[in-house]
Image (cartoon, rainbow, N blue to C red):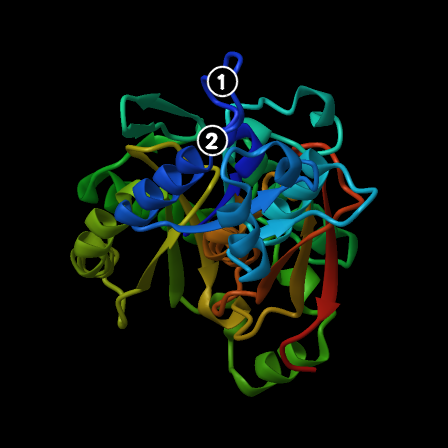
Amino acid sequence: MQVIVDAANVAHHGKMEGQPSLNRILQAVAALEKMGYQPVLIADASLRHEIDQKDEYLKLVEGGKIQEVPAGTTADHHILKLAYEEDSKILSNDVFREYNDEFQDIQSRRIPFNFKGDNVLVGSAAKPKKIKNILQKISTQTLNEFEKKGYDSYRLKKNKKLSGIAVAKEAIDRITKTKEEGIDSKLENVFMKIPFFEKVLNMVEDAETTSDFIIFVLVSPRDYRDAVRNAGNIAVTVGDRLKMDHAPLVAVRNDLFTKPGSFELNIIYSDEILEESPYHVNITINDHDYPFIKKNSRNIASTVAARLGTWKFPIVSVKPSMLMEKPGNFEIHLEKGGRD
């Protein structure tokens, strides 16, 4: 990882009456390299006039080892801007308080340091603060955008305790109730509006009374692997108990609304499943939350697909925006995708 070194701040560390020290800078560079970092030295133009070993310092500047900020540019602002543009850490004891409004969560980038004799003690950056429930908020708004375009979604949040037996029993109860009372699928009327799905229905005799189901098991990402292990047994158990000609297909999906240790079921007639997501999801997010949302983009896609009843995940793209200054800010835009 690249670390931008606030050269003036390092050189002035511990200075009482003496000059800022070039050796301090070189010691810091050596310590960072030993830790596997790639140091980039940035200094304000005035440091060349104050440093103790001027000739050696100027050689480093002329050789490109130390970069001086452009004339008329504030070194602190230049360092922060470069760090955010290149997603780098900053070695500095300056807290950059005057720039908190412009650059969010500076302390998660800043690495503090100290000198003990000739040794450099390099600290660690503070952990970035995460906006509470931002993944759920993004998923909720995404589902809202789909619903505006006529696609209903599964919204129940019972969060029953997770186990293979519990999942099978819930599926059996739900399917039995459906057979006894008649299906009133919240998705069926919506999908009938889609030409592609209407063609599929016309090709399947008695599609409305078929007993072939897709069971989406929605679990927390933490429980995904354990739930997958039980998927086959759940399918066999449900199929045998209900005397189905074909066991239902059980698909486990990561779901951001489901609490660890619990589950939800979205049970849909197999003929109601859309193979492709009708829309891709474009998320524009603030710089602060971008890495976290990018890392979880597949979980967002899984959540949306399972609750819409779409077999394949929508493509979820995440991009940062400098216009969104505050953590928690985001926008959702659906872009036409899938099959016509």
State which quadrant residue 81 falls in: top right
> Going from the N terminus, do you reach mark 2 or mark 1 first?
1
Count residues near mark 2 (Cα–Cα under 10 Å), then give few for <14, some for 14-19, many for 20+: many
**Residue 199 is drawn in which quadrant?**
bottom right
Give yes or no for contact between labels 2 and 1 (Cβ–Cβ under 8 Å): yes
Residue drawn at the location 65% of the way across and 48% of the way down: 68
Q: Can residue 294 be seen in this view?
A: yes
Q: Name the residue under label 2.
A: 21
Q: x, y percentage for residue 165?
A: 18, 41
Q: What element carries label 1?
A: loop
> Relative to residue 52, is residue 149 drawn left or right?
right
Q: Mark 1 points at which residue?
A: 15
In this orientation, which residue lies closer to the viewer: 330 or 144?
Answer: 330
Crowding near the residue tagged with mark 1, few <14, some 14–19, many ≥20 C-alpha atoms within 10 Å: few
Where 214 sits versus 285, above or below? Answer: below
Residue 301 position within the rendered picture, expressed as x and y whole percent measured from the top left: 52, 57
Identify residue type, mark 1: Lys
User: Which one is nearer the viewer's eye here, 298 or 88?
Assistant: 88
Residue 262 in picture, x, y percent from top left: 32, 34
Identify which residue is drawn at 58% across, 22% down: 95
